Amino acid sequence: MAYWEAMVAIVTTQSPRSLEYLIPFCKQENHDTLVYPNPWTGASTTIFIYAAEVSTLCRQNRLTKHLSTSLASTEVCENIFHEQLTKAGELEAKVLQYSPPVSGCIKDPDDRFTPVSHLQCLAQIYRFSVLVQLYLTFPDLLQKSNTTMSTLDTDLSNETSQRSLNEIIVGIEKAILSVHSSDFMILHWRSLVRQKLKVLHEFVRLDPVPRALQILEAVWLRADLCVSNRTNTSTQVFIHWLDVMNEERLESIFG
């Protein structure tokens, strides 16, 4: 259920209350409980629950921004955005505090192609993807998380011991979002992403993989058009993939 809620939350706007029944299951992956790997969520059911909550909140935020142009009361919109940002901060704290179950607490799946370490690695990948989704939709979270941190143009090695891993991750996220990459580097990384997705599709033969590439290509095209049409070069161009997915009718998770 956690897996499907996470998938459905990407393509369907719903109330956060619809996910409340899953919250008690977030506490099951603790260091005292043996985790049995699940075919859908691996050893990270909790992070899928957080992913469902984050996707639901992000879709609501996109919808609110679209509706705000037709709402008469600016104060109402500001209150809604404030509530959403507060909720986003709460979810960010949960995701940052999350860590995959330790090796001794994960039942060995008895599959030489799926060692426990892979399950832990996937849990971290899902965790990072949830954080990125939060920061893309609520960039103010980065400013709040870095109020006491110095910028990354100093030598991180001198400060690593004084910072938590989560603080370093958040700092790197902020640096990535502030980088103005050259056209050459942008084309290089896009080409690399295309290649990786095509190789993945050849391996798994699942239609959602090329569908993800379709969404990426549409996002890149719109971003390029915005850059070429803008008059102020200092204005940051940001195209949200959720908007593109809806407008291009690429919502189907089955491809």
Image (tube, helix red, strand yellow):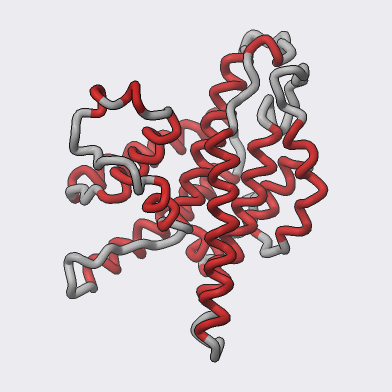
Most foreground residue, 33 or 119: 33
Residue 110 sits in which quadrant?
top right
Most foreground residue, 142 or 110: 142
Residue found at the very far bottom of the displayed protein:
72
Q: Residue at x 78, y 57 (%)?
A: 18
Q: Residue at x 30, y 63 (%)?
A: 237
Left or right, residue 38 beside residue 48 = right
Rendered view: 84 above or below 120: below
Rendered view: 88 above or below 101: below
Residue 56 sits in which quadrant?
bottom right
Left or right, residue 250 beside residue 135 = right
In which quadrant of the rendered image does the N terminus lie?
A: top right
Rendered view: 127 above or below 100: below
Q: Is residue 122 visible?
A: yes
Q: Residue at x 78, y 37 (%)?
A: 25
Q: Is residue 67 visible?
A: no
Residue 187 pos. (x, y %): 25, 46
